Image (cartoon, rainbow, N blue to C red):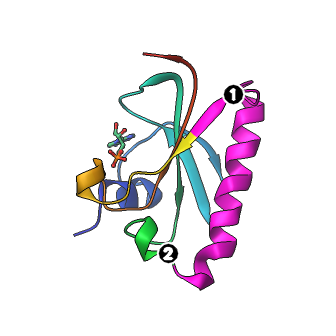
């Protein structure tokens, strides 16, 4: 069964998408923990950070580029966090690799 993020990628369920490329999607977290809380995900189905392969490293670089671009676009480039939870023990709830971009005031 596909994850909720795969459904967002396939536009089967709505999300507040703020940026998209051929390989990366960025949308607002539905339960924000800061005044800016974006999720940046690869469109490729990668379960978690530990599953990233050497061949995915260019894609991971693209995600970092999107994070830099979004930090600039949302005026938090002076201070933000890029967070990845890996595995259920860390609190990862959605089994599709995602980077939390958190900026501004904590909520
Ligand atoms: P994690 O705990 O690292 O797996 O984070 C999953 C994040 O996905 C949480 O911050 C959720 O609020 C967020 N989330 C879950 N479902 C959706 C959704 N349909 N649209 C946007 N964000 C979501």
Residue 79 — which label? 1
Disc 2 target residue: 52
Q: Position of residue 102 (x, y in %)?
A: 55, 32
Quadrant the C terminus occupies: top left
Q: Is residue 89 left or right of residue 53?
A: left
Q: Main secondary structure of the magenta part?
A: helix
Which of these two is toward me, 46 or 54? Answer: 54
Quadrant the N terminus occupies: bottom left
**Residue 103 seen in render:** yes
Q: Is residue 94 left or right of residue 55?
A: left
| Label 1 crowd bin: few (<14), some (14–19), many (20+), radius 10 Å | few
Q: Position of residue 13 (x, y in %)?
A: 35, 48
Q: Is residue 39 magenta?
A: no
Numbered label tally: 2
Which of the two labelled residues, at mark 1 and mark 2, occupies the earlier sequence position? 2
Q: Secondary structure at mark 2?
A: loop
Q: Position of residue 10 (x, y in %)?
A: 43, 61
Q: Residue at x 40, y 43 (%)?
A: 14
**Residue 93 seen in render:** no
Q: Residue at x 28, y 67 (%)?
A: 2
Which of these two is toward me, 41 or 107? Answer: 107
The residue range painted magenta reads 53-81
Image quadrant where residue 72 sits? top right
Q: Position of residue 82 (x, y in %)?
A: 57, 43
Q: Is residue 61 magenta?
A: yes
Q: Is residue 4 left or right of residue 99?
A: left
Which of these two is toward me, 50 or 40? Answer: 50
Rendered-image quarter of ligand 1: top left
């Amino acid at each position: 069964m596909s994850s909720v993020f795969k459904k967002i990628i396939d536009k089967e369920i709505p999300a507040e998408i703020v940026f998209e490329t051929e390989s990366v999607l960025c949308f607002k977290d539905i339960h924000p923990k800061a005044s800016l809380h974006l999720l940046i995900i690869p469109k490729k189905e990668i379960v978690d950070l530990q599953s990233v392969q050497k061949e995915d490293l260019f894609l991971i670089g693209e995600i970092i580029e999107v994070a830099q671009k979004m930090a600039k676009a949302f005026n938090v480039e002076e201070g933000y966090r890029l967070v990845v939870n890996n595995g259920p023990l860390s609190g990862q709830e959605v089994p599709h690799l995602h980077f939390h971009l958190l900026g501004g005031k904590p909520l």
